[in-house]
Image: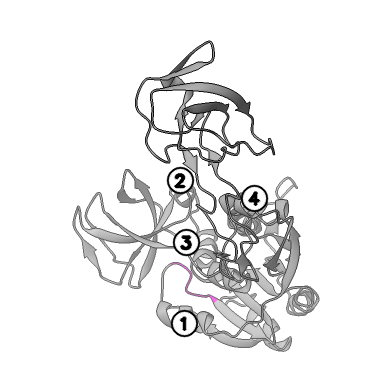
Amino acid sequence: MVTIEEALRIIEDQKISLKSELKPLEEALGFALATETIAPFDVPEFDNSAMDGYALCGLYQEYQLVGEIAAGDSKDVELQDGKAVRIFTGAKVPQNSTAVMMQEKTSVTDSTLFLDEMPKVGQNIRKKGGQLTEGQTVFEKGHFLNPPSLALMGSLGLSQLEVFSKPQINIITTGNELVKPGEPKTEGQIYESNSYAISGALRQFGFKHHQKTQIQDDFEATKAGIKTVLESCDVLIISGGISVGDYDFVKQSLEENGVNELFYKVFQKPGKPLYFGRKENQFVFALPGNPASSLTCFYIYVLPLLQRLSGYQKTGLTTYQFPIRHAFENRFGRPSFLKAAVVDGRVEILDGQGSSMIQSMAKGNALAFLDDGETLKEGDLIRCKLISQ
């Protein structure tokens, strides 16, 4: 058995090889850049107006209007002292422009422009290269592509991006008692739910599974099923069958399939019977069968490795500290990840902490962490990882 810290370190210490691929700009959201991005030109490429209004030459309150420039016009206009042109947001400002005055602070009579206030030099002009200069590093290798990143890449004229590939992920669930939702079940059977939680958590963080398989609690079936599924993935996530019961065949089946155990069992609650192994460049997580245990282990252990395999610079859920709403003592006998709700910056430890109880986890939005025997009084800070908004 290992500690939480030891388990996380073992996962972090794994040497990995990253793959890259070209992605169309519109499909690159949630990927990490595989190369550094350099600005091919200045952004903006020319001085342009920050708003609808008038481009002015000189500092006066009265000007002679001599024309109009719309966004996208390519003509070069040179203003003379005391002259102004009507201009629109994003349009190239004329040479010798001193400032742009917003239209709300102006009035026009015939061809004379009157300002409500004196302009200031450079006012409302976006300068060439004000955001990026040609040759400047835009993003480092490993940058996570969020929507603003895609907007900036698009503004650089980049239609395809080289990104790190995400791992191929397969899911196996085990159990004779499990029935697919929507199908009839008999007494003693339950509806299978863990695969839906795992696949949902994958999608939540920008991943997806490529194959989902249900295996019965039989050694030969488990061994054969793992062999088949393992051949087509980078990461295999197994739910159930990893404890020490008479019908728990996963650990032995993994050994038979050449998977090297890196750790088995973590001193924590929930999720003690957690397995992590490796076969060459393939990784296996065998999660406990209880729903809350399975999902907790995914958030704490599986997610960081998936993100590393995707080239992310930052991995795992961020730990925050919030004041607790009420006194609480960890009497579970192990360091514990507790189902919690963070509301208005304060933490409530929820009822229903059993590893089979998923409703409280569904109603919460965080995993709060307490060491074995740790006691907090109202208002003390408690460590939390947010798992949803």
Residue bearing mark 2: 363
Please tell me how crowded label 1 is: few (under 14), some (14-19), or many (20+) other residues with Cα within 10 Å.
Answer: few
Residue most extreme to the front: 81
The amino acid type of the residue labelled 2 equals Lys
Q: Quadrant of residue 228?
A: bottom right
In the rendered structure, find residue 355 and report the number of the disc placed on it. Answer: 3
**Nearer to us in this view, 361 or 298:** 298
Residue 359's place in the image compared with 287, above or below, is above
Circles 3 and 4: CB distance less than 8 Å? no
Distance in Å between CA atoms under marks 1 and 4:
40 Å
Residue at 35 percent of width and 28 percent of height: 118
Q: Does 103 appear in magenta?
A: no
The picture quadrant where one finds residue 3 is bottom left
Q: Nearer the viewer, mark 3 or mark 4?
A: 4
* Left/right of residue 333 with respect to residue 98 in the rendered view: left
Asked if the residue at tag 4 contacts the one at tag 1, i.e. Cβ–Cβ closer than 8 Å, the answer is no
Task: Point out the tag, 3 or 1, that comes first from the N-terminus.
Answer: 1
Sequence-first disc among 2 and 4: 4
Q: Position of residue 344 (x, y in %)?
A: 32, 43
Query: Regarding mark 2 in the picture, which secondary structure is present there?
Result: helix
Q: Nearer the viewer, mark 2 or mark 1?
A: 1
Instruction: Give the labeled residue for mark 1.
Output: 9
